[in-house]
């Protein structure tokens, strides 16, 4: 904040000093989204998150996917960890993928950006890499 009601994208500490009206105006200026129907306290927290996300880039794609998965509560995915060796048979051929200590995915002597890229190369169709290699599984009802 550079003064009362003037938001800088990195200074969330001064949000405490803003009135509800100033928070609403800051929300509109910063996000361009419709004003949520929440209390001043919750709007302050939401605006603080938006301000920080604009500076730091928000949450990663992997984190967003994990949160979506947790919210749906239908599947669980184990992460591919360094040192893992994943083996899958496809059309009579055994495929082995290794996750290096540096997190690099290797298959057939080549480095890949994701397990999904490897699964696509093996099958010729779009696959979830974690599902293809057995890391993503449906939850069993308790």
Image: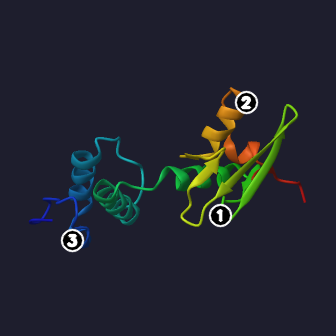
Out of 72 and 136, give the one closest to the viewer: 136
Say what secondary structure mark 2 lies in: helix
Residue underneath mark 3: 14
Q: Residue at (22%, 53%) from the top-left corner? A: 26
Alpha-carbon span between mark 2 and mark 1: 23 Å
Q: Can you tell which quarter of the image residue 51 is in?
A: bottom left
Q: Residue at (25%, 58%) from the top-left corner? A: 23
Q: Earlier in the sequence, mark 2 or mark 3?
A: 3
Q: Earlier in the sequence, mark 3 or mark 1?
A: 3
- Circles 2 and 1 in contact, beta carbons < 8 Å: no
Answer above or below: position of 110 versus 100. Answer: above
Residue 56 position within the rendered picture, expressed as x and y whole percent measured from the top left: 33, 59
Residue underneath mark 2: 123
Answer above or below: position of 7 versus 35. Answer: below
Q: Is residue 54 visible?
A: yes
Out of 48 and 89, give the one closest to the viewer: 89
Out of 16 and 92, give the one closest to the viewer: 92
Residue 71 lies left or right of residue 30; in this view the side is right
Q: Can you tell which quarter of the image residue 44 is in?
A: bottom left
Residue underneath mark 1: 81
Alpha-carbon span between mark 2 and mark 3: 54 Å
Q: Residues within 10 Å of mark 3 (few under 14, many from 20)?
A: some
Say what secondary structure mark 3 lies in: helix
Residue 86 lies left or right of residue 83; in this view the side is right
Residue 68 position within the rendered picture, expressed as x and y whole percent measured from the top left: 61, 49
């Amino acid at each position: 904040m550079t003064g009362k009601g003037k938001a800088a994208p990195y200074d969330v500490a001064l949000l405490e000093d803003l009135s509800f009206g100033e928070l609403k105006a800051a929300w509109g200026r910063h996000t361009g989204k419709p004003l949520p129907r929440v209390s001043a306290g919750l709007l302050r927290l939401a605006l603080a998150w938006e301000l920080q996300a604009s500076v730091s880039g928000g949450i990663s794609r992997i984190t967003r996917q994990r949160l979506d998965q947790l919210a749906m509560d239908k599947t669980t995915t184990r992460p591919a960890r360094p040192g893992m060796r994943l083996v899958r048979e496809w059309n009579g051929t055994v495929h082995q993928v290794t996750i290096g200590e540096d997190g690099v995915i290797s298959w057939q002597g080549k480095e890949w950006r994701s397990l999904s890229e490897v699964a696509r190369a093996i099958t010729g169709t779009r696959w979830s890499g974690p599902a293809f290699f057995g890391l993503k599984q449906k939850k069993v009802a308790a």
